[in-house]
Amino acid sequence: LYRIVTNVYLDERKRRAARPQSSLEEYLDVPDGQVKRQIEDSSPGPEEMAEQAERHSILQTAIDSLPDFQKTMIVLYHVQELPYEEIAQILNMPVGTVKSRLNRARRALRDKLLAQRELFSA
């Protein structure tokens, strides 16, 4: 058993000697001879997550304050991402009516959000 381990060690040593390895530190000009890993973290930080949660809460409150028919239009189109034609089938109305009601719902939502922004900035 001792001889097998010795032979495996010697074979590995010969193999490594045949292919010399070089460190990246030799090619990089870094202080203290150390290469630091610099991997950018693409996930949002705690502050960004808190801001995102606050924006979502404000938007949800504004949507909930809309009349039911406008809320339905916003949710079907923007949340569930249904096309106009499918919304028209679900609500049993012409596509043109869906477009005009969705436009009115967007304007009402925008007005509510702008009023809230003015309330917070005052």
Image (cartoon, helix red, strand yellow):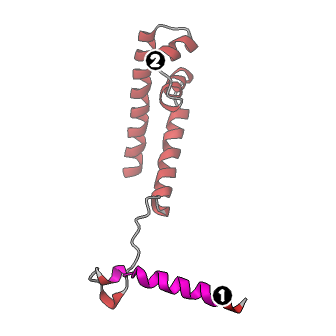
Residue at image position (50%, 37%) is: 62
Amino acid, disc 2:
Tyr
| Residue 28 lies in quadrant | bottom left
Does label 1 or label 2 sit earlier along the sequence? 1
Q: CA distance from mark 1 to mark 2?
A: 73 Å
Q: Nearer the viewer, mark 1 or mark 2?
A: 1
Q: Position of residue 36 (x, y in %)?
A: 39, 79
Q: Quadrant of the N terminus?
A: bottom right
Secondary structure under tag 2 reads: helix
Q: Within 10 angstroms of label 1, few (less than 14), some, or many (20 or more) residues?
A: few
Residue 47 seen by the camera: yes
Q: Position of residue 51 (x, y in %)?
A: 46, 55
Q: Is residue 61 left or right of residue 100?
A: right
Residue at image position (53%, 83%) is: 12
Q: Which mark is residue 84?
A: 2
Residue at image position (38%, 39%) is: 114
| Residue 19 lies in quadrant | bottom left
Q: Which residue is mark 1?
A: 5
Asked if residue 21 is among those painted magenta in the image, a careful observer would answer yes
**Which region shows up in magenta?**
4-25
Q: Residue furthest left?
A: 29
- Secondary structure character of the magenta stretch overall: helix
Eyeballing the image, is 88 above or below 108?
Answer: above
Q: Position of residue 121 (x, y in %)?
A: 37, 51
